Amino acid sequence: MMRYDHVGGKFLSAVRYLAAGTESLQDRVTQAINELSRLREAEMPPSLRSRFANLIRQTASLQSENQANAATPAPALTDAQASKIAEEIVALFRSIATTPRDSE
């Protein structure tokens, strides 16, 4: 993972937010996405760039859509949406962590 240590560190922070936070799942996912949104797609391993870009785009889209459709203040994500995003963050972290040091 040497080439991607910075990326791995950001994903590790995101996974820590998800696992150790005391806030709602939606809030923990939002914190994790905020951490990951500091990364650029080009910093990701090439094989994961499209998944990363989709994660960031879809999360922003869902948050905007949910807030626009809410008549009263509501979480930016539903439980199901937050759970699916959390699973993808963990899956991407696993892929980054297991990327061979000399690949890509």
Image (cartoon, rainbow, N blue to C red):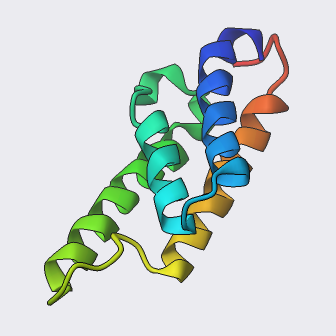
Decide which of 33, 47 is in the foreground and name it.
33
Q: Quadrant of residue 101?
A: top right
> Taking 11 as reference, is 76 left or right?
left
- Tell me where residue 45 appears, x and y as whole percent: 61, 27
Work out which residue is located at the far bottom of the displayed protein and give it: 71
Decide which of 64, 53 is in the foreground and name it.
64
> Taking 66 as reference, is 55 left or right?
right
> Taking 35 as reference, is 19 left or right?
right
- Tell me where residue 40 appears, x and y as whole percent: 40, 26
- Residue 60, above or below 76: above
- Tell me where residue 23 appears, x and y as whole percent: 55, 60
Q: At 40% from the left edge and 28% from the top edge, which residue is drawn?
A: 38
- Residue 39, above or below 89: above
Q: At 53% from the left edge and 49% from the top edge, which residue is drawn?
A: 51
Q: At 44% from the left edge and 54% from the top edge, which residue is drawn?
A: 30
> Taking 11 as reference, is 60 left or right?
left
Work out which residue is located at the far front of the displayed protein and give it: 22
Q: At 60% from the left edge and 40% from the top edge, which residue is drawn?
A: 14
- Residue 84, above or below 21: below
Number of disc labels: 0
- Tell me where residue 82 appears, x and y as whole percent: 53, 69
**Position of the C terminus by quadrant:** top right
**Position of the N terminus by quadrant:** top right
